[in-house]
Image: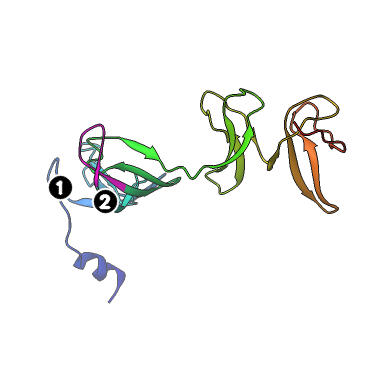
Amino acid sequence: MSKVELFSAAQQELCPQCGAELVIRSGQHGPFLGCSTFPQCDFLRSLTPSADGHIIKVLEGHACPACGADKALRQGRYGMFIGCTDYPHCDYSEAITHADSTEVPCPECQHGTLVKRQSRFGKTFYACSEYPKCRYALNYPPVSGVCAHCGFKLLYNKKSAKGIKTFCANKTCGIEASSISEE
């Protein structure tokens, strides 16, 4: 069977706006179905899966605070999240946080603690629990202590070829902390 016969055997879909035949086209964002009478009719429909998050599991008994429908566990472009089952009519969503608290106080705002988080690329970092009020973040595991050079109230551990070393978390200092005074 040739390619022409294979595609002609498929049932042709009709445009819901004008009734003409829909054809497969390729664009900047991937393949799509478009009306064969374009530009007179501008109907199109994407053939790639949408990035709004497909439902993995419906969380029955957990009502959406916005509309009252059930919540659902969804997989989206940036990972798992909880959203309303009545999406696109209701756009409620919430992040799933697996924040591991370090009990190390945030040196910037002094209200929150540093928690372990993961970026959308899978890299681990430590950020203030008071986000978005406080945007302090650190790429290495925090250590309670005071820098002997500048007096900054946070240090961090960093692996090197010679073992684990402790540095000042102050971006303007960054000196290796050889004498650590615990608070």
Question: In the rendered image of this protein, does residue 150 appear above or below residue 84?
Answer: above
The segment highlighted magenta reads 61-72
Question: In the rendered image of this protein, does residue 166 appear above or below residue 148?
Answer: below
Which residue occupies the extreme bottom position in the image? Answer: 1
Image mark for residue 8: none
Q: Position of residue 107 (x, y in %)?
A: 67, 27
Q: Counting other residues with Cα less than 10 Å from the Cα at mark 2, is it few (<14), some (14-19), or many (20 or more)?
A: some
Left or right: where 152 falls relative to 12: right
Residue marked by disc 2: 58
**Is residue 28 rendered magenta in the image?**
no
> Badges 2 and 1: C-beta atoms under 8 Å apart?
no
Left or right: where 74 falls relative to 14: right
Amino acid under disc 1: Ala
- Label count reads 2
Closer to the chain start, of discs 2 and 1, is 1
Q: Quadrant of residue 94?
A: top left
Q: Position of residue 92 (x, y in %)?
A: 30, 35
Question: In the rendered image of this protein, does residue 7 appear above or below residue 145?
Answer: below
Q: Nearer the viewer, residue 111 or 13?
A: 111
**Is residue 71 rendered magenta in the image?**
yes
Specify the quadrant that holds the C terminus.
top right
Q: Position of residue 66 (x, y in %)?
A: 25, 31
SS under mark 1: loop
Residue marked by disc 1: 20
Amino acid under disc 2: Val
Q: At x 75% / y 43%, what residue is drawn?
A: 157
> Nearer the observer, disc 2 or disc 1?
2
SS under mark 2: strand
Which residue occupies the extreme front position in the image? Answer: 183
Q: At x 58% / y 27%, what residue is drawn?
A: 135
Q: Quadrant of residue 155?
A: top right
